[in-house]
Image (cartoon, rainbow, N blue to C red):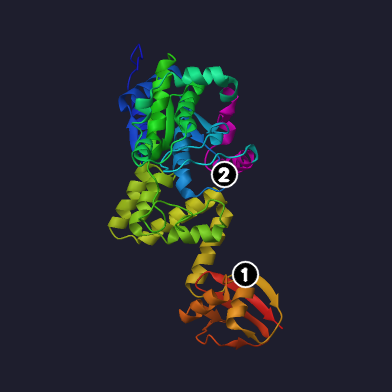
Amino acid sequence: MSTAPDYPITDAVREAMAVTLRGCEELLPEADWQKKLARSAATGRPLRIKFGLDPTAPDLHLGHTVVFSKMRQLQDLGHTVIPLIGDFTSMIGDPSGRNTTRPPLTREQIEANAKTYFDQIGLVVDVDKAEIRYNSEWSDPLGARGMIQLAARYTVARMMERDDFRKRFEAGTPISVHEFLYPLMQGYDSVALNSDLELGGTDQKFNLLMGRHLQQEYGQEPQCILTMPLLEGLDGVEKMSKSKGNYVGITEDANTMYAKVLSISDTLMWRWYELLSARSTAEIAALKREVEVGRNPKDAKVLLAREITTRFHNAAAADAAAHDFELRARGGVPDDIEAIVLAGAPLAIGQLLKHARLAPSTSEALRLVDQGGVRIDGAVVSDKALKVAAGTFVLQVGKRKFARVTLS
């Protein structure tokens, strides 16, 4: 990039560079980003930082918030973050990492999902200070003529260098022509926003580089790109995914969220600190040293669980979740368990667990009994043929599921 004159690399610029690099997978080109930071510091002009979201599903988990957390770090440095809702590109469907054509969304699905995204993004990013945009603002007016002119700025050969397109072509899997438009339109978003930096997951690198290419085609200074890694889920192995069941949903209740964070391994905890915590690098390093010289790692994990639960709920909910977790760990009964009234005594234990909504089916309920995971008033139930008499009692499954049942 051209930055004449060259601006000084101050301690503040170096610190901003360290914040940018924290936890990131790749920053390209690093030297250009440092120059942009130096120019911003000298001139007082905030940098424009873009992150596109196609509202393809309404619910987000902690894995999605890795990029949000980076946006907030850069926002706190005084730069302008631009959460870009891809209401136009969602109608194409992002082919990244897919071996089949992604079905496009309807306008109604896009609008419903986008509203939920805003509510959830706002739990991490200060949306009042953000520049929230929709790419239909400039994509719809482009029209057929503009789309043809845009497509002329990139070759099919270059498009086929993209890994997922190449693999599908070699395997004889169909590639629809409209899928070539997706990276072009995402790149054109960077032109429309005149972005200095675009954030994305590692699977978005091709699309992010497209933005650099098109900005140069349109005579703009090219953006830098920053990719963030995929967050490992609760198992510490697979990436966080609802389909794999290893996720923490950011709209889950506080007790569940707190308990899930505490369930991760001591090793994974530091990875989560790096990618999710708002604590400084120095604070995390000091905490890690304390653990290395003998402090119980659970103390650090509790701090992380409290921070995350507070972020997506509030401090009072985090305190209550911590109390609830310790009570359950000691075998105690939480104060706020659901009260359920059932009829049909005496009732078979499998039916009882199903009707109390502590098991999805009778067969699953009996499997839980086999595993020793069912208690009535603290006593383990071992008889799958048990018929429970009328009365009021606490029914428990595992460590976290309770119901106060009145059976008549």
State the residue in front, 391 or 55: 55
Q: Is residue 298 left or right of residue 408?
A: left
Q: State the image quarter where residue 29 is shown.
A: top left
Q: On screen, 281 above or below 196?
A: below
Q: State the image quarter where residue 36 is shown.
A: top left
Q: On screen, 218 above or below 389?
A: above
Q: Nearer the viewer, mark 1 or mark 2?
A: 2
- Classified by dominant secondary structure, the portion drawn in magenta counts as helix
Q: Which residue is mark 2?
A: 120
Asked whether 137 falls inside the magenta stretch, the response is yes
At label 2, counting other C-alpha atoms closer than 10 Å, the crowd grade (few under 14, some 14-19, many 20 or more) is: some
Residue 41 can be seen, yes or no:
no
State the residue in front, 13 or 194: 194
Residue drawn at x 48%, y 62% is 259
Q: Magenta part of the protein: which range?
A: 109-138
Where residue 379 sits: x, y (%)? 53, 84
Secondary structure under the numbered disc 2 in the rendered image:
helix
Say the numbered circle drawn on residue 304: none
Q: On screen, 377 above or below 95?
A: below
Q: Earlier in the sequence, mark 1 or mark 2?
A: 2
Where residue 365 sits: x, y (%)? 54, 76
Q: Which residue is mark 1?
A: 337
Q: CA distance from mark 1 to mark 2?
A: 27 Å
Where residue 123 sits: x, y (%)? 55, 44
Residue 15 can be seen, yes or no:
yes
Q: How many marks?
A: 2
Residue drawn at x 52%, y 70% is 327
Q: Amino acid at mark 2?
A: Gln
Screen quadrant of the N terminus: top left
